[in-house]
Amino acid sequence: MLSATEKSAYLAGIRDGWPFVFVAAPFSMLFGVVAIEAGLSLSQAMGFSVVVIAGAAQFAAMQMMVDGASIALVLLAALAVNLRMAMYSASLVPWLGTAPLWRRAAVAYFLFDQCYMASMSEYESTPMSVSDRFWFFMGTATPLVPVWIMFTAIGAIVGTSIPPEYALDFALPITFLAMIGPMMRTLAHVVAAFVSMCAGLALIWLPSGSGLLIAAGCAMVTGVVVESWMEKRT
């Protein structure tokens, strides 16, 4: 049974996580639609969504599969898109690194962008024990996970009958703009995002989405260079 502080932390996590449901629902429904249109069965689409549970990486991998890319390129693209999860995990170590293994495994599985953003904001502003931090994180994931799975199923079942004027595909860029915007805190962040955008647009003609990989690499190198330059100046 949860202690009083753990229960409070869990409820606070639910409070901070539930607004993200409004972007997770169309996002996951769109994935269900795209998966069926790409030729996956309902069970395959649901298995992909439940096991991988990786949002943008699922879309990147699915698009490259539709484009006929090789398995190696599909995996490379998914890994490139999900590199941010490695950075999320590294930045969570000071806050959750001493938690038991099963709790760290649970955090790794439920590591949504939204859960990370909400949890880091809370950790940096509110003193909490490691256990309370874990339950806060799980609270942010609680409203998102069932919505993600349920709306993937709805998208896969309803599929092409969803009117195009609903513009579900808008959920993807809006979600990431809303999350990434507040993270543009330094010059390195802004320049890296700008380079990523320009390179992605300039290389859109490359086959199998390989321009995405090149743009991501350019952005990471640019961010490191600008960050190093700024540190030398201080």
Image: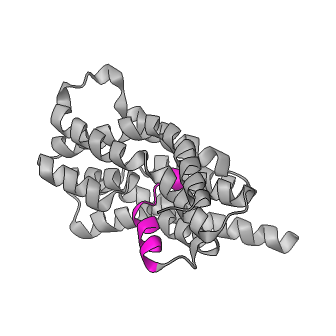
Q: Residue furthest right?
A: 234
Instruction: Give the residues drawn in magenta, as a range.
Output: 101-115
Q: Can you say which quadrant of the picture contains the C terminus?
A: bottom right
Q: Nearer the viewer, residue 6 or 135?
A: 6
Q: Nearer the viewer, residue 78 or 155?
A: 155
Vertically, is 47 above or below 42?
Answer: below
Position of residue 24 measured from the top left corner of the image (x, y, whole percent): 41, 41
Query: From where the camera sits, is residue 125 visible?
Result: yes
Position of residue 42 measured from the top left corner of the image (x, y, whole percent): 13, 46
Q: Is residue 164 magenta?
A: no
Image-quadrant location for residue 93: bottom right
User: Residue at horizontal 34%, vertical 23%?
Assistant: 166
Image check: 224 left or right of 234? left
User: Residue at horizontal 48%, vertical 65%?
Assistant: 85
User: Residue at horizontal 45%, vertical 52%?
Assistant: 141
Q: Is residue 103 magenta?
A: yes
Image check: 58 left or right of 2? left
Vertically, is 171 above or below 116?
Answer: above
Image check: 179 left or right of 224? left
Position of residue 33 measured from the top left corner of the image (x, y, whole percent): 23, 38
Image-quadrant location for residue 161: top left
